[in-house]
């Protein structure tokens, strides 16, 4: 192998120190580049923070707009009070359970096992027992149809306050699906993709029953890997049967002891787990904050490893294309600028952005018009835009050859299912236009139009929504714990399926509903969903935003909420 950058990444060559004459500017950005200006000194969302990258900047070829409106003070106080009340009643109910006045349905240690190592941490289950169980009916709902633009849900009831559920035998028909990651609408049971997957199942069967290195390497797998490499614009690629394991099992093969991993604070659990399993030193930078990232890079170069102060073997930056809880897009041009300046390596997770961003659907790299070779490791999944399962890693050929031998996911995991492989091949060719039709490009345009329309309407209604204007992930802020369950239930009454999220998956005062816009949604479906959201928003008093609202100038959160009291 030649000693190029990919080999250095694999063999763990030391990271070179920067020259002393290259200093960072006062705001912490690279001085040699006209990097997007950011005024915040610490990670706090100001009342009305809209980021716009200057079109004149050499790093951005289009405006970059993101909005994170600050949590109203009164709402924040009431949210903390709500969690406090729930906690107090939780301890009261635990007291009643200990004295056998109330039955506890969760698994607990037997009295005979008290001398053994505990299997269940009682305090860690406090949230599950007393908070999650009260609104558990909003999750784990059985679906009995294709999770497309519309879906069918199995109706269920609970006789014991969400501890157990029983199916009534009824089915909720044609529920508008606003929660699935079906960005391009390829999760379907009819059409070209479904027909091709069906034919592949007849020829190859449903499973492989072996690993890629033994008897599970099909010609379909190699065809898919060549297609993914062309789609991404990289030398080579490798596919895996599980998206989560693509991160958690490959990062340990790339870094180890003596290496430094710099991770965004809002990275997905699979990235966090992979970094921890690697044994590398982990340092976290503030979300999408280039000042924080550059400070960590500077300190790592100057001080080296703890105690010994030897240079780090590798410095690996972990970021995502679209952050699935925030709806924000990574500032990739700035990350690449810093990566080049400090000679670090970049691992980009495009699970939500591949297929959903860019004029050609090639992800966040395509969205910013960047060179794919500037990203050392390109990772993504097929579970969202392609309507399938699994993940991929793309990069230089030397990198992929190394992973084929050292990745646990490649050596020990069963190969990707043949019909799933064919689903990905067909949908990817459709996006690339290699099927001889324009369906792929039409879906990309439809997704962009739906995203813009849906976000604009929610803004006009007065909701606080987070994220980038071009992100199909749309978080709508609920804040208070009681409104998490109420929103999900009220939306389902109106035949709209949504995903609601709360603590600990989000910060304690930033509970939210997360909508995922799809190209399969028609304008009529979106209008129906928006009307229902507006109606529920008035019912639960969720329209907290003070932007673009009549008479909002000079008003505060207290007066706004008081005006909406019954």
Image (cartoon, rainbow, N blue to C red):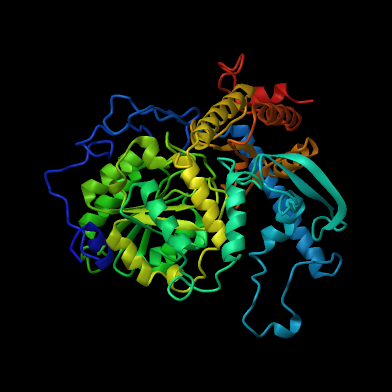
Q: Position of residue 157 (x, y in %)?
A: 85, 53
Quarter that holds the C terminus: top right
The quarter holding residue 419 reads bottom right
326 left or right, relative to 513: left
Q: Position of residue 399 (x, y in %)?
A: 31, 61
Decide which of 477, 58 is in the foreground and name it.
58
Decide which of 478, 221 is in the foreground and name it.
221
Residue 284 shows in the view: no
Residue drawn at the location 38% of the way across and 55% of the way down: 226
Is residue 370 depicted above or below 168 in this figure? above
366 left or right, relative to 419: left
Residue drawn at the location 47% of the way across and 66% of the way down: 218
Q: Position of residue 417 (x, y in %)?
A: 55, 63
Q: Position of residue 406 (x, y in %)?
A: 36, 71
The count of marks equals: 0
Quarter that holds the N terminus: bottom left
Is residue 202 depicted above or below 157 in this figure? below
Decide which of 141, 315 is in the foreground and name it.
141
Residue drawn at the location 38% of the way across and 39% of the way down: 366
Residue 435 shows in the view: yes
Given the current orientation, which residue lies at the most extreme top position?
Answer: 551
342 left or right, relative to 291: left
Is residue 389 depicted above or below 181 in this figure? below
């Amino acid at each position: 192998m030649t000693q190029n950058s990919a080999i250095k990444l694999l063999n763990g060559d030391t990271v070179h120190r920067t020259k002393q004459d290259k200093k960072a500017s006062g705001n912490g950005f690279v001085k040699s580049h006209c990097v997007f200006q950011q005024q915040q000194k610490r990670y706090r969302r100001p009342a009305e923070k809209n980021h716009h990258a200057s079109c004149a900047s050499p790093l951005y070829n289009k405006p970059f707009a993101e909005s994170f409106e600050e949590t109203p003070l009164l709402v924040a106080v009431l949210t903390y009070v709500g969690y406090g009340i729930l906690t107090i009643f939780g301890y009261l109910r635990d007291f009643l359970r200990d004295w056998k006045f109330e039955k506890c349905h969760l698994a607990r240690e037997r009295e005979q096992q008290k001398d053994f190592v505990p299997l269940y941490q009682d305090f860690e289950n406090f949230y599950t027992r007393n908070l999650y169980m009260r609104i558990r009916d909003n999750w784990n709902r059985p679906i009995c149809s294709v999770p497309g633009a519309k879906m069918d849900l199995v109706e269920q009831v609970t006789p014991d306050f969400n501890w157990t559920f029983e199916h009534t035998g009824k089915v909720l028909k044609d529920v508008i699906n606003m929660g699935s990651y079906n960005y391009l609408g390829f999760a379907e049971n009819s059409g070209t993709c479904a027909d091709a997957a069906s034919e592949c199942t007849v020829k190859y069967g449903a499973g492989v029953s072996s690993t890629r290195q033994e008897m599970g390497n099909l010609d379909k797998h190699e065809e898919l890997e060549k297609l993914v490499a062309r789609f991404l614009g990289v030398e080579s690629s490798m596919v895996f049967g599980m998206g989560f394991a693509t991160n958690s099992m490959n990062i340990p093969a790339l870094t180890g002891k003596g290496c430094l991993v710099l991770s965004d604070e809002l990275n997905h659990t699979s990235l966090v787990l992979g970094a921890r399993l690697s044994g590398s030193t982990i340092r976290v930078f503030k979300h999408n904050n280039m000042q924080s990232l550059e400070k960590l890079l500077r300190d790592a170069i100057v001080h080296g490893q703890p105690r010994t102060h030897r240079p780090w073997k590798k410095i690996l930056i972990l970021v995502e294309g679209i952050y699935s809880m925030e709806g924000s897009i990574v500032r990739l041009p700035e990350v690449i600028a810093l990566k080049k300046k400090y000679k670090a390596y970049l691992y980009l997770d495009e699970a939500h952005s591949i297929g959903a961003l860019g004029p050609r659907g090639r992800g966040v790299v395509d969205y910013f018009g960047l060179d794919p070779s500037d990203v050392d490791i390109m990772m993504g999944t097929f579970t969202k835009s392609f309507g399938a399962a699994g993940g991929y890693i793309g990069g230089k050929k030397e990198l992929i050859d190394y992973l084929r031998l050292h990745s646990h996911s490649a050596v020990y995991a069963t190969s990707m299912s043949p019909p799933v492989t064919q689903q990905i091949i067909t949908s990817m060719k459709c996006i690339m236009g290699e099927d001889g039709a324009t369906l792929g490009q039409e879906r990309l345009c439809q997704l962009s139009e739906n995203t813009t329309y849906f976000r604009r309407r929610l803004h006009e209604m007065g909701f606080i929504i987070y994220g980038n204007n071009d992100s199909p992930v749309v978080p709508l802020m609920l804040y208070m714990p009681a409104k998490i369950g109420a929103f999900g239930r009220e939306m389902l009454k109106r035949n709209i399926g949504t995903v609601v999220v709360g603590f600990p998956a989000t910060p304690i005062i930033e509970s939210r509903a997360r909508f995922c816009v799809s190209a399969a949604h028609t304008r009529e479906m979106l209008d129906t969903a928006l009307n229902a959201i507006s109606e529920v928003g008035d019912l639960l008093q969720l329209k907290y935003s003070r932007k673009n609202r009549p008479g909002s100038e000079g008003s505060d959160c207290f007066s706004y909420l008081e005006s909406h009291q019954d």
